[in-house]
Image (tube, rainbow, N blue to C red):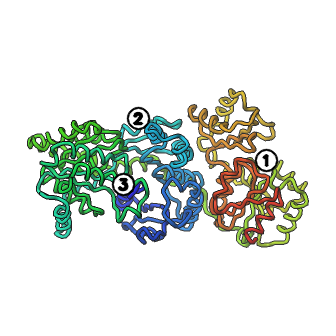
Amino acid sequence: MDADTGGQTKYVLELLRRLGKARSVHRVELLTRKINDVRLSADYAEKIEVVADRARIVRLACGPERYLPKEQLWPHLQEFIDNALRYIRDQGEVPDAIHGHYADGGLVATRIAKILGIPVFYTAHSLGRFKRERILSEGMSPRASERKFHFRERIEAEEETLENAELVIASTSNEVETQYARYDHYDKDRMRILPPGCEIEKLRTRLSASALKEFRSIGTKFLADPAKPALLVIARPDAQKNTAAAIHAFGRSNLKDVANLYLFIGLRTDLDSIGQPQRDLYLEMFNLIDLYDLHGSVAYPKTHSPELVTALYQHARNTRGVSLALSKHENFGLTLVEAAAAGVPVVSSGAGGMSDVLKNCGHGLTVDPENFEETAQAISGLIADPARWRALSAAGKKNVSRFYTWQRHIASYLRLVKQLTPDRRAAPSVRKRVKQFATARHYLVCDIDDTLTGDDRAMRQLTDLINDRDDILFGIATGRNLQSARAFMEESRLPDPSLLITSVGTRIDYNFGRFNQDTHWHRHIQFRWQPHEIRALLSQIDWLEPQEPEAQTHDKISYYLDRPLPTAARAIKTLLRKSSLQARVVVSRNRCVDVLPVRASKGHALRYVSWRFGIDMSHVLTAGDSGNDIDMLRGLSRGIVVGNYSKEVGVLKKSKDVYFSEQANAAGILDGLRHYGV
């Protein structure tokens, strides 16, 4: 229907189904977004959908209930992560591994893996840097492309996922060499080319009488002579699929005299109910059919079922037709594989990953799709040469089984998974809630500097409130080290916190009568952490000044910027990535820079605690003012941003569960508690 419902969706669903049938798989679950939208099937609102005995789809809340294009999901992903962690904990079983698909799914999988300490695998399907270059080359302005596609967030998500992934699965060598190679975290040693499988048996199965009758009715409705060889285009309504080139080649030549053109282009009810890009594409298609007067030679049904697609392939084979794949770019090209399985030769642009399929299957010809005469000649030449047509048809049917069966894909996939998934990593043990956590209804976690500090009177009022309320549990999440944080609390006579997250989330201490460090968290965040190498590398940057010795720890490297620099974080990240060093970079107040292990942050630490003790994040209130508070304020927690917040926190203004107080410091916290009815 649109850019979110293409071949990658079909691939992920089939991967789920096939893994669920593999004997070595205990359970496989596909976590996706729950959608309740009158324009879509009610299935999308089902919490659980069983696909096979050991495979199911689990749908979780994420932002508004209605359908949203993937480009609009970024502000809501932390909510999805929190709901996923809640769901996994409720199952009482930690997954052995998590596999993220596409940019947003990759980021979600990476963040979950950081909490649980399990390996993350990644399949991008398409990559932002490559898409941005292509769109800019086609004339869209950088500002317009950013507004529409949110490339900055997408590319940063892809970089973070590539940085953390144990394994990256690509479909073609073209994808590895021309797309992934554009990224700072490109590491060919962690990449494997594993082409998707194809449902070969379905394309060769005898169809039901009702499906054949429905397919014949399409021919009767649209075509003057349905017995002519069939030229087929099967694609979603996307300009990249280049459907117009197929119509131009067909209309400008004598092909309409010797063949019929079938356009199975997405699914539509009426043009008013679809998005503008899809509407524009359909209107162009209808206009071209009128321009070349192709009525009686072109079939373009509004909808088609999977069985009708199979019927079309079989009809093309029986009439000695040709499949057209003239896309401007394809990461893979599933329709080429389907055509090979059905025994239908292909005329293709060969763009992107399609070149791999054509090379492996040997069942097609490559043309310049913008040269309509060349394209038409290649098609008519195949139709007019039965011997060549049969040779290409036979090659496709023979070779597709060597490269593109699901059995081959699943066997290779599970072999890789087993190699990279130890027998239960040291995942954080799930603990029963201690008395303090069990009796509280609200968990208030506050930053110290410029959030609690700055208004002594309001801080005393907040202290009195916490002391008077048994249902509020108090915690601290600060950039200060443990000694500095405890000294401040004693001096300010703050309530004794039950939870103390210090040094920007690199240390966690619990206070169940006495302070106790979470040593598992300390071990957990050492993942790929190389502090000595990072210090040596960053010492070369002249605009970074190391902070005082007491601000430094083994797991937190801190600097001052010698001048405000909006691109500082990006510049530091790029330098680290190009040096194969992995770290999290946080800029606060336009002046302070913290470099942390990739698994560490205030938000990660808080969610780790929530996971271990079964604290529902929707019962957590967080208060902060600066950049290192952002991931703590997002998600299911009810965030409070105090009035004196720094500029970088403004990105949260669109988040539905973040309250921006007009009052500064501790007065802003009190205002936020009133806002949430606490």
| Residue type at numbered disc 3 | Tyr
Q: Residues within 10 Å of mark 3 (few under 14, many from 20)?
A: some
* Residue at the disc numbered 2: 177
Where residue 445 appears, x then y in whole percent?
74, 60
Q: Amino acid at mark 2?
A: Glu
Q: Earlier in the sequence, mark 3 or mark 2?
A: 3
Cα–Cα span, label 1 and label 2: 44 Å
In this rendering, the answer to whether 648 lies above or below 86 is above
Of the pair 119 and 517, the residue shown nearer to us: 119
Q: Secondary structure at mark 3?
A: helix
Q: Horizontal placement of 533 versus 334: left or right? A: right
Where is residue 566? Give x, y as percent: 68, 39
Q: Nearer the viewer, mark 1 or mark 2?
A: 2
Residue 11 - label: 3
Which of the numbered marks, if any, corresponds to residue 164? none
Q: Which of the numbered marks, if any, corresponds to residue 480?
A: 1
Q: Is residue 643 left or right of residue 633?
A: right
In the picture, measured across the screen, residue 618 lies left or right of residue 492, that is left
Q: Which residue is drawn at the image coordinates 71% and 41% (left, top)?
A: 594
Q: Going 53% across and 55% down the picture, which residue do you hit?
A: 72
